[in-house]
Image: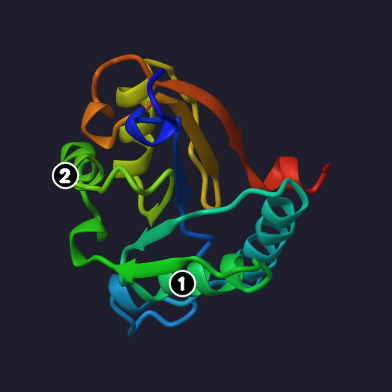
Amino acid sequence: IESLSKIELTRMKNLFLLRHAKSSWDNAALGDFDRPLSKRGISNAIQLSEYIQKHSISFDLVLSSPSERTQSTLDLVMSSLDPIPSSNLKECIYHASASSLIQLITEQDDEINNLLIIGHNPGLHILTETLTNESIVKFPTCAFAKITNFNHWKDVDAGILTLESVITPKELNHD
């Protein structure tokens, strides 16, 4: 009889994608990278945090664009989580293409089971459609997608992934 320690136990991976919350355009002097969240964006990010907590969703690692609006979204969404997951700001996520995001995801260690990426459109929208072969009409600000059905990060582009859910701020208002 083979001992359990010799059996490789592979856990299903969960890829979560979050588009930053609504940003403010009030200060025309600010560049795109430095735009803060709007009042609605702050409210939506707090609602999403409550949704994540209510549904016992957890992350092993969070990778975020370093822009002001993504960092603020990260801070607000993680604020009520316990434990707060490890997070890293990745310059390569700022306005990344779907193919750049796929490369980043496939480089992750398989010790990580639940990965959250906080970024921007159109990259996240195209990535979601590319990985799942699902057509999504909109991926609005603060949209939160869960993609499943794979066991290794290197297989994320194997064409077998399932779009389990996409939660939008409008749906959070009815949750």
Q: Return the mark for residue 100.
A: 2
Q: Is residue 168 left or right of residue 8?
A: right
User: Depth-wise, is mark 1 or mark 2 nearer the camera?
Assistant: 2
Q: Position of residue 123 (x, y in %)?
A: 29, 43
Residue 122 in view here: no
Single out the residue that lies furthest toward the front. 1
Q: Is residue 52 left or right of residue 69?
A: right
**Mark 2: amino acid:** Ser
Residue 91 falls in which quadrant of the image? bottom left
Residue 20 in view here: yes
Q: Is residue 69 left or right of residue 90?
A: right
Residue pictured at 55% horizontal, 53% vertical: 142
**Mark 1: amino acid:** Trp
Q: Is residue 46 left or right of residue 113?
A: right
Q: Position of residue 103 (x, y in %)?
A: 16, 42
Quadrant assignment for the N terminus = top left
From mark 1 to mark 2, how far is it between C-alphas?
27 Å
Residue pictured at 28% horizontal, 36% vertical: 153
Graded by Cα atoms within 10 Å as few (under 14), some (14 to 19) or many (20 or more), the crowding at tag 1 reads some
Graded by Cα atoms within 10 Å as few (under 14), some (14 to 19) or many (20 or more), the crowding at tag 2 reads some
Residue sitting nearer the eye, 96 or 1: 1
Q: Position of residue 129 (x, y in %)?
A: 36, 25
150 vs 83: above or below: above
Residue beneath disc 1: 25
Residue pictured at 38% horizontal, 79% vertical: 28
Quadrant assignment for the C terminus = top right
Looking at the rendered structure, the secondary structure element under dot 1 is: loop
